[in-house]
Image (cartoon, rainbow, N blue to C red):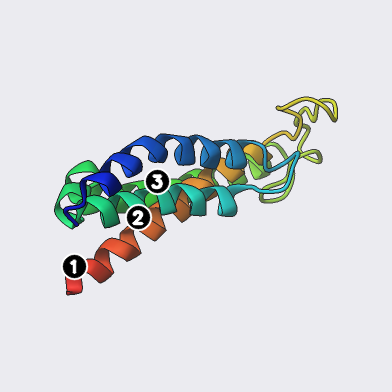
Amino acid sequence: MDDLIVKIITRTIIPFIQVYGIFVIMHGHISPGGGFSGGAILGASLILYTLAYGYKDAAKKMPHKVSVMVESGAILWFMAIGLVGIIMGGNFLSNKAAGFYMGNLSMLFNAGLIPLVTLGIGIKVASTMVTLFHTIIEED
């Protein structure tokens, strides 16, 4: 697309969308949201960049190899956090039963390993959305 207004508005609004997506991911254990919805917001911001600037410019920002590596890394992160529960003597993704500090109800870091799990889920969802969208565009 060669519309200057769309490009300027996109460039202006994308950082706000991404900050909101990170906010939703990081506050998913104390408010509505979480890894999936925050990751969808982050992925949508990257797809918006692709729609406004075209596939070639978007591929320079996040090449296919990088998105696949981030996608795989997020799954490995999720599995590693799950294995921490087993190592600590609980079940896979065990939290309080494995002895992690749960904090107070009003604190941001009050859920043990759950914020780390939602971070991995958010990154996985965002990178999967971008990978799928770019794959569909490449086929045309």
How many marks on residues?
A: 3
* Residue at mark 1: 138
In this rendering, the label closer to the viewer, 2 or 1: 2
Q: Percent x, y for residue 75?
A: 46, 51
Decide: is 64 above or below 112: below
Q: Amino acid at mark 1?
A: Glu
Residues at marks 2 and 1, CA–CA distance in whole angstroms: 14 Å
Quadrant where the C terminus lies? bottom left
Residue at screen point 77% across, 27% down = 101
Q: Describe residue 99's horizontal placement relative to residue 122 as left or right.
A: right
C-beta proximity under 8 Å, tags 3 and 1? no
Q: Percent x, y for residue 109?
A: 71, 27
Q: Amino acid at mark 2?
A: Ile
Q: Which mark is residue 73?
A: 3
Q: Earlier in the sequence, mark 3 or mark 2?
A: 2
Residue at screen point 36% across, 35% down = 12
C-beta proximity under 8 Å, tags 2 and 1? no
* Residue at mark 2: 47
Q: Which mark is residue 55?
A: none
Q: Percent x, y for residue 65?
A: 22, 51
